[in-house]
Image (cartoon, coloured by chain):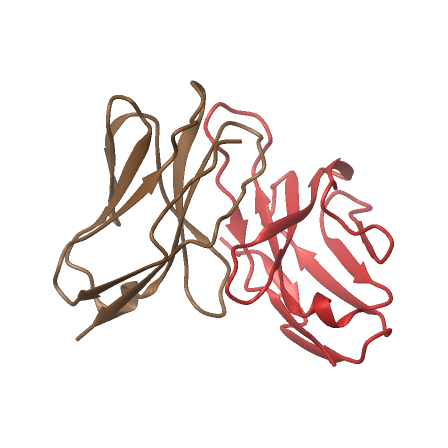
Amino acid sequence: LAKTTQPISMDSYEGQEVNITCSHNNIATNDYITWYQQFPSQGPRFIIQGYKTKVTNEVASLFIPADRKSSTLSLPRVSLSDTAVYYCLVGEGFQKLVFGTGTRLLVSP
Amino acid sequence: EAGVAQSPRYKIIEKRQSVAFWCNPISGHATLYWYQQILGQGPKLLIQFQNNGVVDDSQLPKDRFSAERLKGVDSTLKIQPAKLEDSAVYLCASSFSLQGVTLNEQYFGPGTRLTVT
């Protein structure tokens, strides 16, 4: 399982774009990159998943460079409700999810 | 669609007592997971079921923890006897299948917060 490294915390203000970068230097050929979001007192929630280039959904965008050794989760125009912990995970198929400590995002007014 | 249900939401016990948690996954989800999340850390997988069979229990402290999923639907996780370090949130998650190429999307329940005194 590829190890991931992401910032421990980030601060932002409402309406700004937030980019959280995750490093995964040992990513394997078949691995996908997945991001989960966790609010206090709730279980993690799947946000987005990608393999290469760019993926976008109604919540976020995921940018993956050609070498796939890192990825960036982009949250457009964050609001107070985006305050949460964001986890970057790497793996394939039936591999178990290995969560790190995640990135604590604090959005202020 | 109903989400993953867990009960109880909170539990306080004394060390050396026993406790059980219950999980009902999303209907049709063959794979069920139990995680332990200690304050300030990410969730750690304890055990993974595919239907009623165990796929991975490598991180389950088997001297005190046990889990079952007898009919391949709901599941219980038991701790006996509890230790102070078992204080954590116990999360249940489910996913549609082990099959597939992409990393399977897991749906988490709200968790049970256990405090051992």
Query: What's the residue at 70%, 77% (across, down)?
Result: B11
Residue B51 in which image quadrant: top right
Report the quarter where the C terminus of chain A lies: bottom left
Q: Colour of chain B?
A: red
Residue furthest to the left in view is: A15
- Image location of residue A80, percent across then percent down: 24, 70
**Above or below B55: residue B67:** below
Q: Colour of chain A?
A: brown
- Image location of residue A11, percent across then percent down: 24, 64
- Image location of residue B27, percent across then percent down: 60, 47
- Image location of residue B26, percent across then percent down: 58, 49
Query: What's the residue at 14%, 58% (across, down)?
Result: A77
> What number of labels is visible?
0
A26 relative position to A68: left or right: right
B16 relative position to B76: left or right: right
**Above or below A90: residue A19:** below
Residue furthest to the top in view is: A29
**Above or below A52: residue B114:** below
**Above or below A95: residue A109:** below
Query: What's the residue at 12%, 63% (across, down)?
Result: A15
Query: What's the residue at 71%, 40% (across, down)?
Result: B49
B102 relative position to A22: left or right: right
Residue B38 in which image quadrant: bottom right
